[in-house]
Amino acid sequence: MSGDTTGEILIEARGLHKQFRARGALPAQSVVRAVDGVDLAVRKGETFGLVGESGCGKSTLGRLFLRLIEPSDGAIFHKGTDLTRLTHRDLRRRRRDLQIIFQDPFGSLNPRKTVGAIIAEAYAIHALGNRAERWRWVAEMLDLVALPRQAVHRYPHEFSGGQRQRIGIARALALKPEFVVCDEAVSALDVSVQSQIINLMRDLQQELGLTYLFISHNLAVVRHISTRIAVMYLGRIVEIAAPDALFTRPMHPYTRALLSAIPVSHPDQPRHRHVLPGDVPSALGMHIGCRFAPRCRYAEQRCREIDPALTALSNEGAVACLRVADGTLPDDP
Amino acid sequence: MPQVLSVEGLSVRLAARPDTSSILDDVTFSVEPGEVLGIVGESGSGKSMIALSVMGLLPPAVRLSARRLSLVGDDLAGKPREAWRPHRGRDVAVIFQEPMTSLNPVMRVGRQIAEVLRWRRGMTGARARQRTLELLEQVEIPSPRNRLHAYPHELSGGMRQRVMIAIALAAEPKLLISDEPTTALDVTVQAQVLDLLRSLQRQTGMAMILITHDLGVIAEITDRVLVLYAGRVAEVAPVRTIFDRPAHPYTEALLASMPEITGRSHRLVTIPGSVPEATNMPPGCRFAPRCQYRRDACTSVVPAVRPIGDLHEVGCIRPFGYAQGASAAADAAA
C-alpha cells in the first residue's frame, strides 16, 4: 500500500490545541477552537490519512505539525525534539525534513518566478550547493515528477493544473524531506489527472521512503492511499482505524454517517444512507460533553455531559465515544 | 408529451477568434419530460456552456449557433437573447455551484423568493408570503418562518443552496438545470441536497439536467447520462449502460480512474495528458492523443455520434475498442 512501516514513530502531536480569535463575534464566543486537544503519532513510512468536513480543523492540524502556525498549547515531537520549543533558526534547519504540498496549484506557486527558480529557492534558503549543482538538482527533481527539463525556464501559468501540482511536489521534495503534509493535494484536479498524481505520490513514497500526512475531504482517495485514517470532527479526532476496518466497520456514529453520505459508485449499489440533521456546527465557544452529541441519533444524557476520550480498541483502532467504550452503541439499522 | 428540450448541432465559439476550435462542437441531445439527464465532464469539457446556452445566458465573448434549440416546443435557435426572457424562470430555471454569488447579498431571502412569485406567477401580498413559506418548507429549511427574514450570509452553504432551489422551484419550471449543485458542499450536506433534489423532482415531475464532474453524483440521481469531452459528445446512454457497458474509451477510462470506495487498493488507471484547451484542439477525435486504442484514422477523422444500441449513442469510430471481440458486436448493433 505504501512504503515500509517499521512502527517507529516519526512525528507526534501531544495535547495539541489551536485557538483563533474570531472577529465580530460575541465576547463569550470569541474563540474558535480549531484544534482542541489532539494526540496523534505518525509512524515512519506510513501514509496517515486525515479526513473530515470543512471547519473540522484538519488543515490547521496539518499546519501545526510543521509549526507553520504556533499552537496555543501542546507539543509536536519530531525524532525526540519538541518543535514548539525550537528557535526560528533551528526550526528552519529542521524544515528540510518537514514539507507541505498545498491544494491549489494556482495560488501556491509564485507566478513571477520560473519553475527552475521556484524549485531552486529551497537550495538557496538552506545554502546548499553552488549554482551548477543547484541546476543539476532541479533537473533531477523535474525528472522525478516526470516534467520535461525544458520546464525550468517556463512560468507556472504555462502549465495545466496537474503539471502545476507536479511542480508543487518537486518543490516540496527538493530537499529530500522525511515527512510531507499533503493538504488536499489532489482535490483541485480532475479525476483523470488526480489518478496520475496519486500514483506519482505513491511511487515517490516508495522511492524516497517518505512519510505522508494526507489531508483530504475525499474519502475514496484517502481510503485508496492511506495505511491508517483519522476522522476529525470539530477540532477533535473521533476515530482512528486501518482503511479496511474504517470503511467496512466504522465505529463512531459520526464516521458511520460520514461514510453513508458518500455517493454510490454504481446506480444499482444499495443506499444505506443516514442523513445527518443540520450542518457541522461552528467551532466557536466552549463545548460541554461530546461535540457530536447534538447531531447524534444515539446520544444519551451522559453524552451531553461527559467529554469522551479517544480510547484504544483491540484492533489497533481508537474511538472517542462513550457508548462504543462500554459496548452499548447499537448497529445502524 | 413533447420533449422539454431538444438541442441539435449546438456549437459555441469565441466571438473574437471564430477560426479557432469551438468550445462546444455540434452537440445534440434532448431531455424528455420527467427525466434526469446527467452531463458529466472534466473542467474544460464545456459542460457549463451547455447550461448557459440553454438558459440564453452566454457571455458576450462567445457566439452560439445551433440547428435547433427548442425549449418546450419554442425553437430559439438564431433568435436574440430577448427571446429567452419569457422562458427563463417559468419554463427553465438554473441553480449554480456557489449559491453565495447567485443570491442577492443585501436582500432578505424571503423577498428573493417572493420576487419570482410576483414576476413569474403574478402572486402578491399574503398569497406570495404563504407560498414562499411553503417553498421553504418544501426544501426542508428548519424554522422557515424565521428564515424568511435572514440575509444570505446568515445561512450556511447547505441552507443557501436550499434557498437557491426554492427560488428555482418558485415558478414551477418544466426543466431545472443544476450546474455542480453540490460541489461546494461537504459530503454529508451533499447527501442532503441530492436527496432533496431527487424527491422534489419526483414530486413535481419536472425534468432535470444535472451537470457534474462527479460520477458518484451521476450514479446517485440520473436516469440518462451524456459524457462530454473537450466540447463534443463522447457518449449518451442510460445510466446503467454507462456504468456497465461504456462504449467510448474516454468513458471507460474515466470510470477506471475513480478510486473505488468499496474495492481494494490497487494502482489507479490513469489517462495520460490532460484535456486540451479550446484554442488548441487536436484534429480528428479530440480524445485521440490520450486514447490507448487510437488508430491512424482517429487523428484525422472527426467521429460522428451514432447509435449503437437502445438509447445508446457513441462518438467513436471504434466503440468498445477496449473489449476484445466486442467491436464486432457493436458493429452488428449499429
Image (tube, coloured by chain):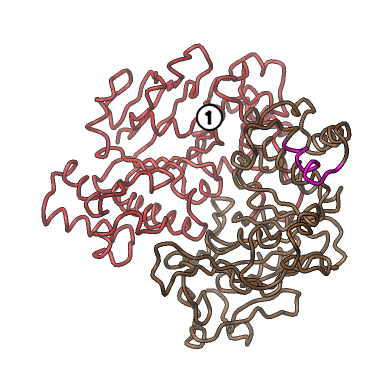
Chain colours: A brown, B red
Where residue B33 sits: x, y (%)? Answer: 34, 40
What's drawn in magenta, residue-wise?
A: A118-128
Residue at the image position 13 percent from the left and 55 percent from the top: B127
Residue A257 in sight in this render? yes
Residue A1 visible, this angle: no
Quadrant for residue B136, please give it: bottom left
- Quadrant hosting residue B5: top left
Q: Position of residue B303 (x, y in %)?
A: 58, 20
- Percent coordinates x, y for residue B159 in the rendering: 37, 58
Q: Residue at x 66, y 23 (%)?
A: B288
Lateral position of residue A134 relative to residue A198, left or right: right
Compared with B149, B327 (above or below) is above
Residue at 42% of width from left, 22% of height from top?
B10
Instruction: Tell which of B71 and A294 is nearer to you.
Output: A294
Q: From this view, report whether residue A96 is shown above or below residue A156.
A: below
Q: Say what secondary structure mark 1 lies in.
A: strand
> Quick one: label 1, few (<14), some, or many (20+) residues within 10 Å?
many
Q: Quadrant of residue A153?
A: top right
Residue labelled with disc 1: B313
Q: Is residue A322 positioned above or below A333 on the image?
A: below
